[in-house]
């Protein structure tokens, strides 16, 4: 689950310099520096409050924080080379935490609409462990109501035995981290897989017939050129997966790549934002020529109905999300909260208190409205009727000044239907979202 957002924007306008380093992808609001221990009581209240929330979709996020190796650019919470004992203990704790949440008054008895197993690398678990994990989840929350069950895989561990367990257990969406199809670029990023691993994984996944397969690519990796990027994309287009996601490389300060750049240890620094955006622009054009529809700021889908990404769409429209696992993020009853961010503290907290909540942020009605508006812009636009019915606001009036400013840049249009981003707007949406923030959040950081 991507959880960052860059912070060095002067949000009073859209002309601030592009960040060279720093986070960029906005996935929550208000920014993390507004979250605090003091607001944890609001999370507890939301979970205890049993007022009917049945009409609000409920999703689960399970974080598996283990990888074979750490990639140089990665900012996700994960630990390399776990032992079998560590992963076994972690699964036990995850299931304990989930069971405890299932008994909270505002959760008990509710049907689950979507589930996401993210990492780290969930496919690093063995087939037997994945079976145990899925059985354990189903024991607590029957998944037959879920419209989507998504599981993240890395190419080397997307093996036949694991995929069989996933398919039999009802996983509907596999997301495979390809990043690029060039061995030199993969090696320079510290990826352990090579092109041949992706080809093998792709054939195996195809054999199991998952309803949706998403391939993650990245633009802007060390060693990447137009040639390596578009040759990768050409092969991805031949594969014809239902979804293709293209992330633009972010280099937050907690990554080895950030430090290597600071110490001038990278021979050829990665592409700047203009270059990354130009690659994404051309990639979107090529995907459209092949019949794909651009679904969001970073993703294309071959069939917009069959290839929907419920996890993202539901969250961006205000669904409840219960996150479990180290450092996981939740949004429940209008309250954001995050779990303990270190493995030891997470295990200890669940053991001692039954949960591992670390910090929270209670949103006012207005903050919930702003949150949904900015998140929906990442899907290409927001409907006026949705906001009128749900929040009683006119988008055109409420956001008149920033909408006019962004429209002058050619990034969006506004009419009675709502707000629609242009392609140029979509390509830089994360950069101008803070223009729509409440004044007190505009200069707040995401860490
Ligand atoms: C949790 S990983 C996916 C599964 C698996 N761990 C893997 O990498 O193959 C989610 C995705 O985040 C993207 N990602 C990771 N670090 C990133 C960064 N610094 N900037 C942009 N995208 C990043 C990658 O495309 C990756 O596939
Ligand atoms: S990109 Fe994926 S495999 Fe690499 S360290 Fe991050 S979570 Fe692990």
Image: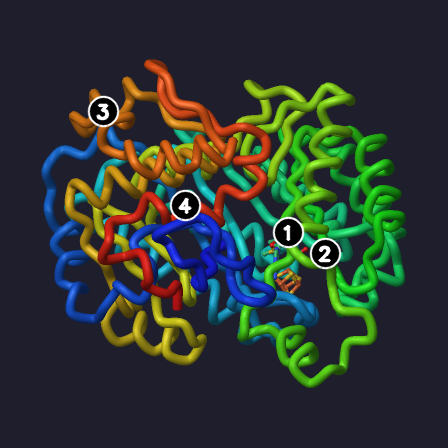
Please tell me in which quadrant of the rendered image residue 86 appears: bottom right
Q: Which residue is mark 4?
A: 433
Quadrant of ligand 2 in image: bottom right
Is residue 158 rendered to the left or right of residue 411? Answer: right
The relative height of residue 70 versus residue 360 in the rendered view (above or below) is: below
Is residue 355 in view from this perspective?
no
Of the image marks 2 and 3, the number of the one nearer the N terminus: 2
> Circle 2 — which element?
loop
Is residue 341 rendered to the left or right of residue 54? Answer: right
Q: Is mark 1 within 8 Å of ligand 1?
A: yes
Q: Which residue is mark 2?
A: 220
**Front residue of this view, candidates 109 and 406:** 406
Neighbor class of circle 4 (other Cα within 10 Å; few <14, some 14-19, many 20+) is many
Q: Which residue is mark 3?
A: 394
The relative height of residue 238 versus residue 75 in the rendered view (above or below) is: above
Q: CA distance from mark 2 to mark 1?
A: 6 Å
Is residue 150 in view from this perspective?
yes
The relative height of residue 381 versus residue 115 in the rendered view (above or below) is: above
Which residue appears at 30% of the width and 36% of the height? 401
Q: Is mark 2 within 8 Å of ligand 1?
A: yes
Residue contact at pointers 2 and 3, CB within 8 angstroms: no
Of the image marks 1 and 4, the number of the one nearer the N terminus: 1
Q: Nearer the viewer, mark 1 or mark 4?
A: 4
Which residue appears at 64% of the width and 77% of the height? 256
Neighbor class of circle 2 (other Cα within 10 Å; few <14, some 14-19, many 20+) is many
> Circle 3 — which element?
loop
Q: Which residue is mark 1?
A: 248
Which residue appears at 18% of the width and 41% of the height? 366
Residue furthest to the top: 416
Residue contact at pointers 3 and 1, CB within 8 angstroms: no
């Amino acid at each position: 689950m991507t959880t960052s957002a860059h912070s060095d924007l002067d949000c009073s306008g859209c002309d601030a310099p592009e960040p060279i380093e720093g986070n960029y992808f906005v996935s929550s609001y208000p920014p993390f520096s507004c979250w605090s221990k003091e607001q944890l009581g609001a999370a507890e209240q939301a979970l205890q409050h049993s007022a009917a929330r049945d009409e609000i979709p409920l999703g689960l996020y399970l974080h598996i924080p283990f990888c074979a190796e750490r990639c140089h650019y990665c900012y996700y919470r994960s630990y390399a080379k776990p032992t079998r004992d560590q992963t076994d203990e972690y699964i036990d704790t995850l299931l304990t935490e989930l069971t405890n949440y299932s008994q909270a008054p505002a959760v008990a008895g509710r049907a689950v609409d979507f589930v996401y197993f993210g990492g780290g690398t969930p496919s690093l678990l063995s087939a037997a462990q994945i079976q145990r994990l899925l059985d354990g989840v189903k024991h607590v929350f029957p998944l037959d109501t879920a419209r989507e069950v998504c599981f993240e895989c890395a190419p080397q561990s997307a093996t036949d035995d694991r995929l069989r367990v996933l398919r039999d257990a009802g996983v509907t969406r596999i997301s495979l981290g390809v990043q690029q199809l060039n061995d030199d670029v993969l090696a320079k990023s510290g990826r352990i897989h090579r092109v041949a691993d992706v080809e093998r994984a792709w054939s195996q996944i195809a054999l199991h017939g998952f309803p949706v397969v998403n391939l993650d690519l990245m633009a802007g990796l060390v060693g990447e050129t137009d040639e390596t990027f578009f040759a990768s994309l050409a092969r991805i287009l031949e594969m014809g997966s239902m979804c293709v996601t293209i992330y633009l490389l972010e280099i937050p300060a907690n990554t080895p790549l950030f430090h290597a750049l600071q110490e001038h240890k990278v021979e050829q620094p990665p592409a700047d934002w203009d270059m990354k955006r130009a690659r994404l622009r051309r990639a979107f054009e090529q995907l459209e020529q092949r019949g794909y529809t651009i679904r969001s700021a970073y993703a294309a889908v071959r069939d917009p109905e069959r290839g929907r990404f419920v996890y993202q769409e539901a969250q961006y429209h205000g669904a409840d999300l219960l996150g479990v696992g180290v450092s996981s993020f939740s949004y429940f009853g209008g309250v954001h909260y995050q779990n303990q961010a270190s493995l030891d503290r997470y295990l200890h907290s669940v053991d001692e208190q039954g949960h591992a909540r670390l910090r929270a942020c209670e949103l006012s009605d207005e903050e919930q409205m702003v949150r949904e508006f900015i998140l929906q812009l990442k899907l290409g636009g927001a409907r006026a009727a949705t906001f009128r019915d749900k929040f009683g606001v006119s988008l055109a009036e409420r956001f008149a000044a920033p909408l006019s400013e962004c429209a002058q840049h050619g990034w969006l249009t506004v009419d009675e239907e709502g707000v629609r981003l242009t392609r140029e707007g979509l390509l830089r949406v994360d950069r101008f979202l803070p223009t729509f923030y409440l004044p007190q959040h505009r200069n707040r950081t995401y860490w």
